Image (spheres, grey):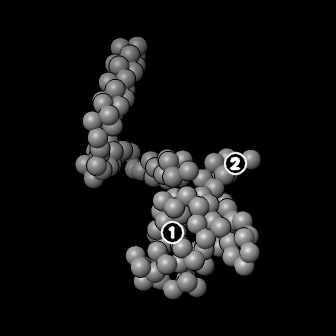
Amino acid sequence: MSGDDVEPRDLSRAEWKVMKIVWELRKAMAREVYVIAGEEHGWTPATVKTLLARLVEKGYVSTTRVGNGFVYRPARTALSTLQAAADSLLTHAVEGVSGPLLAHLVEQTDLNEADLDSLQKLIEAKKKSLNKKTRGS
């Protein structure tokens, strides 16, 4: 079973920050993660070690022992993890706020032309689907 098949457990803000480092490095010795997290967030190696252990326990990171240390790799892709978080967010959204929430995400995100074209196609398909439903009722 791949990491993407595991039901995700919520990540803390600090765990998201460590995951971002692991995703960017793709494969890293623990020491590399400690150094980057220390530089970016001022965390001690002990703090980062605790966060990595939690991420392994939650199934987001896998480890391989190499000599006296460990190599850490993402067990879930960034996209699948973010999609699961978005799904959870939308599941818990109060009725009527999904549209404004999506608009906020689009406003806050750097999107290229291809991303915008893709979103436009999705919006057009949603409109067609909505029109069919309203005509059919």
Q: Position of residue 27 (x, y in %)?
A: 59, 61
Give the Cα separation between the discs numbered 1 and 2: 20 Å
At 74% from the left edge and 47% from the top edge, which residue is drawn?
Answer: 1
State the count of labels.
2
Tag 1 residue? 18
Residue 2 is tagged as 2
The front one of 32 and 107 is 32
Q: Is residue 130 left or right of residue 77?
A: left
Who's the residue at 47% across and 76% down the image?
A: 37
Determine whether the residue tagged by mark 2 lies in a helix, strand or loop: loop
Q: In front here: 73 or 87?
A: 73
Dot 1 amino acid type = Val
Q: Give the mark nearer the N terminus: 1 vs 2.
A: 2
Q: Amino acid at mark 2?
A: Ser
Q: Residue 51, relative to residue 107: is it above or below? A: below
- Residue 134 falls in which quadrant of the image? top left
Q: Position of residue 51 (x, y in %)?
A: 58, 74
Picture quarter containing residue 60? bottom right
Circle 1/circle 2 CB separation < 8 Å: no
User: Dot 1, how many residues are within 10 Å of its Cα: few (below 14), some (14-19), or many (20+)?
Assistant: many
Left or right side of 17 for 126: left
Could you classify mark 2 by the number of other residues whose Cα lies within 10 Å: few (under 14), some (14-19), or many (20 or more)? Answer: few
Residue at x 53%, y 73% (from the top left corner): 33
Residue farthest front in this picture: 67
Q: Secondary structure at mark 1?
A: helix
Q: Nearer the viewer, residue 135 or 98?
A: 98
Rendering coords of residue 69 (x, y %): 69, 76
- Residue 90, percent across and down? 44, 47
The extreme left residue here reads 107
- Report which quarter residue 59 is drawn in: bottom right
Viewer-side residue, 22 vs 5: 22
